[in-house]
Image (cartoon, rainbow, N blue to C red):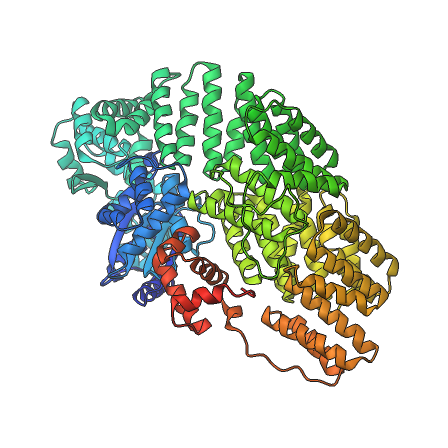
Amino acid sequence: MLHGRRDECTLIDGLLAAAADGQSGSLVLRGEAGIGKSALLRYAEEQATGMRVLRGTGIESESEFPFAAIHQVLRPVAELIEVIPERLGAALRGAFGLGPVTGPDRFLVSLAVLSVLAEAAEERPLLCLVDDAHWLDGASAGALTFAARRLGSEGVVILFAARDHFDAAGLPSHTLTGLDEPAAGALLGAGLSAAVRDRLVASTAGNPLALLELPGSLSADQLSGRESLPERLPVGAGVEQVFLDRVRREHPSTQTLLLVAAAEDSGELAPVLRAADRLGVPSGALDAAEKAGLVRVDAGTVVFGHPLVRSAVYRGATFWQRRDARLALASALDGDENADRRAWHLAAAALGPDDEVAAELHRTADRARSRGGHAAAATALERAATLTADAALRGERLVLAAASAWQAGAPERATGLLDRVVAASPALRCRADHLRGSIESVCGELTAAYAILTGAAADAGPVAAAQMLTEAGQAAWLAGDAAGLREAGRRLAALPMPDAAIPLSAQLVQGLDGLLSGDTAAAARHLRAAAATFSGFSAPALPGIVTAAPSPAAPQRAAPQLAAGGADLRAMMITAAGAMFLGDDAVAVGLFTSAVARARSAGAASMLPALLAPLSSLEGWTGRFAAGTADATEGLRIATETGQDNPAAHLRAVLAWIDAAHGRDRECRDHAAAALTHAIGHRLGPAAGIASWALGLLDLTAGRPGQARDRLVALAVAGPGESHPMVGVFSAADLVEAAVRTGDRATAEAALTRLSTWTADTGSAWGAALVARSRGLLSDDDRDFAEALDRHATGGRPFDSARTRLLFGEALRRRRKRTEARTHLRAAHESFERLGLAGWAELAANELRATGETARKRDPSTTGELTPQETQIVRIVGEGATNREVAAQLFLSPRTVDYHLRKIFTKLDVASRAELIRLAARPDR
């Protein structure tokens, strides 16, 4: 019976009931040692009637071994590894050391864990219990929380019990506090004097374990009140002392056996007994420990009665006692399959630098990294470095540890490791600085990243220098540093060319330099030459889009023959961005989409935020709002999980812009504020500019042209780091409209000049349409509006086209040309409704009423009701993917995809997959 835990039991009961109905959920139970977390897990297991139960426990000394806890959890359903998609099964087998290593990407292993859990719940609901989660190895913690965040309709419940230092961002959490007086008194039971009971309850703050264990450490006279209680009573972690006192009542040989068991992370009985034998422990010592209730033997495994018994035993021993136990275990663990455990025991026993042990740990790290256990690899390499006598080799291992920490999504740990590199060769210092600069560009200050990368490139070979200068150029572009960008381009162009990537990098950076410095014509030459590298790229058919100013240097291009490596994806990303900045939406979307697909195929989820940020921007600007929201939402989730703060700011800005177009005031302001807070502080010009543009668009949408004008003027004149010249160009048409509505002709003309110059140099079809519309607003000439509509027909931006019709209709109505006005206002109203823009549709309806006609209500499209995740599923299914392929791309379980598809079929009123594929191909999707 659980005393005083009614609320917690209700939470657990609700999760179990939902699982019985096919819904999944998770909960993190937090609290100090002994507060009752484990008891609640036992309660959940007792209530899980008809459910399959999997269990895992974090072990402090096991935290160095990647996927150790996951292996423990999934062992009872290991046969299901053969059922999940082969690529995922291979990744999981490689992580467990049961097959060849398939690659180092941790997201593939995490997705495999999610898939196994979903398969395990296929026949009946599944309960997964994870105790002492704060001691999970990093790879297991990441995989389990990854799975918990993506549970949907599998009928899976994951319960974590942890102290406060367990990172489970995004998961529901409940913190346990001490029992109240009635519950604590009931737990203590009879036989205590009232004064003693009150003192115990007060002194333990209602900690259940302390209440249960302390009476056993007190004398009969103390319990009866005849003798005073000790001045200080242990509580929380201090309860360890109670367990230690129990241990010290045992024979020394039993204490030694318990210490060996506490030091052996796996709990496997055989090596514990072999090591104990080497220390002269008689066989009867285990029986004594079991009779004392300190351990039990279960299926060949030594299990401690409570995790605090293990920690009490280990921490209560002297260093020399622990060292003897570790050395005995290392000797008992023979064979290649125990190499990692043996290395860690030897490392724990080392008295100082030991090159042989350091080399063993380095090999352990290599194995962990190859399986995707980057956090464990970082820990092993860090420890190896401390055991390395040679300063240069120590530095090498610290740099490798930092790289693994960065891949594990721990940027602060990575930079801390780099700070410890003292003695380094020029080549090693170059590698360290490259890594530091890369981390800084994603998580920190762009100006600092630029300085680090350009400085390191001076000492690097041509290929490494090209990579660093390209990253530096990208940082300078984002920061609006024209001089820095030009210098990076100059140095790239001067490099020897042993690799085809170097001239490509030079073209890209020089193209960005032209855009930032205002020489758009030169920029177009460089960027289109770079795009030609992706020979034959065939852009997807986006409705109504004609690519800008085709030239011999930029033929229609087919999928680039690049691998999914980071450098290749970065080149594709910058090339796509170049096409976007030239107004070539079709090529840009095609390249971004191809890069995203390659990243997904390779399981390179950490690359997705930087790719999805510009892709979702384009999707929003081209009127594919549902796709843009879905991609930005996914990118933001991954960026948050992997510590990529700078892409996260960009993605929030994109969501703010889409919110603004829909007139969602609170959501827009929240997203924009979050984006601006980070972007301004870190000099992220594009993110800051898009967020400010979103607020200006929100003002226009809400009929506040004066406020819109002020915001957009501030955006246009903002300095580097507060906006970006390209955002100033892209938002110029909105500034023209806001300025004209407020009678500020000079501001409108200046904005039009900026847009006209860029359009003339790039040949952008949608840019030409906005130039003509802006002229029409200033001239009130029907011919300008008519030209704008002709240009929109090939521009592929339906939101802009609908707004042009609205503005044209307004102008015609003001001149009392009501019949002509109605034609354009009616078309604008229908377009806005089709795009799901209720606020803009209402504006068009109001104008139409002013002409004497009432807008006909269009049957509401259920496509607007799809969630971002459902939108992504529709799009990928539309490409012909199976449910399993959709699940792999979106890091979901197949059952969740199946559940969402059923909802999608209902919402869209389709009866077959073929119908859904046809719907996905519609222009407004």
Q: Residue at x 29, y 35 (%)?
A: 100
Q: Nearer the viewer, residue 883 or 481?
A: 883
Residue 840 seen in this snapshot: yes
Q: Residue at x 52, y 66 (%)?
A: 922
In the shown orientation, is residue 5 left or right of residue 647?
Answer: left
Q: Which picture quadrant has residue 736? A: bottom right
**Quarter of the picture holding the N terminus:** bottom left
Q: Look at the picture and state if 660 lies above or below 572.
A: below
- Residue occupying the point 24% across, 46% down: 78
Residue 356 point in image, percent of width and height:
34, 17
For residue 547, above or below residue 499: below
* Position of residue 19 measured from the top left corner of the image (x, y, whole percent): 32, 63
Q: Observer-nearest residue: 754 or 634? A: 754
Residue furthest toward the front?
Answer: 552
Q: Residue at x 60, y 68 (%)?
A: 835
Say left or right for 703 vs 2.
right
User: Is 125 above or below relative to 361?
Assistant: below
The front one of 308 and 742 is: 742
In the picture as drawn, the residue positioned furthest to the top comes out as 390
- Asked if residue 488 lies left or right of residue 259, the reply is right
Vertical side of 140 occupied by 429: above or below? above
* Relative depth, front residue between 102 and 260: 102
Find residue 306 and report its horizontal and vertical position in percent.
27, 44
Q: Is residue 208 visible?
A: no
